Amino acid sequence: MSPKILVIEDEFPLRESLVISLVVEGYEVLGAADGLVGVNLARQITPDVIIYDFHPPQLEGRKICGQLHQNQRTQKIPLILISADRLPEDVVPQPGTFLRKPFGRRDLMDAVLKAIAPALTTRQFHNTNATEIQAQHCPC
């Protein structure tokens, strides 16, 4: 079974581009146009990685992180933050967990591979009800 990725991005062209790029690489990918839908979808499908915009409608990046980390099912999902805007000073992403827009396909794939690397070595993904994947710090 392929790793499942959730993309939370309000800009339709970028969201579709990310989804298509990831599907071509063999991932199962779902997209959400706003933060609230994205968090609810994450709780339902438990993706292996979440790529999210810092400023989507309905729920901004910090709140997305907070809600995901409050839920036992989603708290250990690796997160990749994307933003064209300057991040607030109190938001210090871990290396490899932040992509500044515009970013290239190679940058995207490198970040995704780094996020799922622990699961790839054991072939255990969230969507197969496997044991916990190594926790990564919330970029927010």
Image (cartoon, helix red, strand yellow):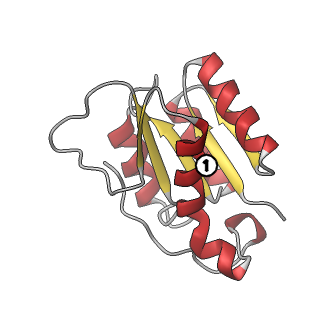
Classed neighbour count for the residue bearing mark 1: other residues with Cα under 10 Å, few (<14), some (14–19), many (≥20): some
Q: Looking at the picture, how far across and down is residue 87, in whole percent?
A: 25, 34
- Asked if 94 appears above or below 72 in the picture, the reply is above
Q: Is residue 10 left or right of residue 26?
A: left
Q: Which residue is mark 1?
A: 109
| Residue 22 vs residue 51, the one in the foreground | 22
Farthest residue, direction left? 89
Q: Residue at x 41, y 59 (%)?
A: 70
Q: State the residue in front, 139 or 18.
A: 18
Residue 107 x %, y % = 52, 44
Above or below for 84 versus 96: above
Q: Residue at x 25, y 28 (%)?
A: 86
Q: Which residue is located at x 70 percent, y 25 percent?
A: 16
**Count of labels shown?**
1
Q: Is residue 129 above or below residue 69?
A: below
Tell me residue 124's x, y (percent).
71, 76
Task: Work out which residue is located at the far right of the displayed protein and give it.
Answer: 1
Asked whether 16 or 102 is in front, the reply is 102
Compared with residue 133, is residue 30 higher up or lower down, i.e. above or below? above
**Which residue appears at 56% of the width and 49% of the height?**
50
User: Which quadrant: the N terminus?
Assistant: bottom right
On the rendered structure, is 110 left or right of 18? Answer: left
Q: Amino acid at mark 1?
A: Met
Dot 1: element = helix
